[in-house]
């Protein structure tokens, strides 16, 4: 367990330190209402198709939870102890993932979609950037995932409202 926590913290720090929506044209591109096609900027030839599908599974649950207005769906996508972070009015907010579950339950059902913009996999860790739309609001979301027990789980979510 300590090894998993240490790996998640290292991965989260790497994303915060090195990742951003530096390709503004890509981050500003509105997400369409299709979540069946994956658009990627990273060369995916090194990642097996079945691995990409396994990584996509928790992302699908993340979006489906919004569509259904049901946090129980999202709980399947996230690791226990996962976090969610963002900046607002020049302040940094780091919250337990329960804040996202509360949001899903409070807002009920609404349209949501995403496109994968970038994926990077290193062994049993992955970083994924998506362009998403929840209702009328577009986001640039970044996720850190860890593969444990053969299943990918989101350990952190950081986002920016477009």
Image (spheres, rainbow, N blue to C red):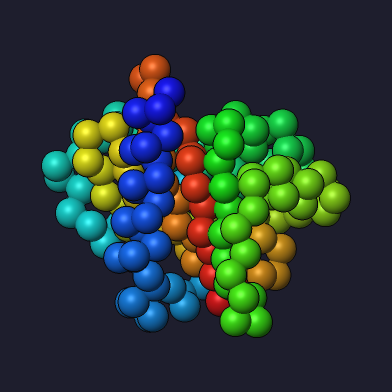
Residue 36 % position (x, y): 47, 46
On the question of residue 16 being in view, the answer is: yes
Location of residue 65 with respect to 114 vertically, above or below:
above
Instruction: Please give the count of numbered marks on the rendered protein.
Output: 0
Q: Look at the image and tell me in which quarter the C terminus lies.
A: bottom right
Residue 18 lies in what quarter of the image?
Answer: bottom left
Q: Tell me what residue is drawn at x 34 percent, y 65 percent.
A: 17
Residue 122 lies in what quarter of the image?
Answer: top left
Residue 113 lies in what quarter of the image?
Answer: bottom right
Q: Tell me what residue is drawn at x 32 percent, y 56 percent.
A: 14
Q: Nearer the viewer, residue 53 or 76?
A: 76
On the question of residue 132 being in view, the answer is: no
Q: Tell me what residue is drawn at x 58 percent, y 53 percent.
A: 84
Residue 35 % position (x, y): 51, 50
102 vs 127, left or right, is right
Q: Look at the image and tell me in which quarter the N terminus lies.
A: top left
Location of residue 79 with respect to 34 vertically, above or below:
above
Q: Name, please, the residue furthest toward the left.
A: 46
Q: Nearer the viewer, residue 73 or 125?
A: 125
Q: Name, please, the residue furthest toward the top.
A: 149
Residue 146 % position (x, y): 38, 35
Location of residue 151 with respect to 66 vertically, above or below:
above
Q: Tell me what residue is drawn at x 60 percent, y 58 percent.
A: 94
């Amino acid at each position: 367990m300590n090894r998993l926590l240490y790996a998640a913290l290292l991965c989260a720090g790497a994303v915060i330190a090195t990742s951003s929506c530096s390709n503004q044209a890509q981050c500003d591109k509105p997400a369409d209402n299709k979540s069946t096609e994956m658009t990627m900027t990273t060369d995916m030839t090194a990642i097996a198709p079945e691995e990409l599908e396994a990584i996509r599974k928790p992302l699908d649950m993340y979006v489906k939870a919004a569509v259904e207005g049901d946090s129980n769906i999202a709980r399947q996508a996230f690791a226990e102890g996962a976090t969610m972070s963002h900046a607002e009015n020049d302040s940094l907010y780091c919250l337990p993932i329960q804040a996202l579950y509360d949001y899903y339950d409070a807002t009920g059902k609404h349209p949501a979609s995403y496109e994968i913009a970038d994926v990077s996999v290193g062994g049993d860790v992955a970083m994924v950037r998506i362009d998403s739309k929840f209702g009328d609001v577009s986001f640039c979301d970044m996720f850190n995932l860890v593969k444990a027990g053969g299943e990918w789980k989101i350990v952190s979510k950081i986002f920016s409202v477009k």
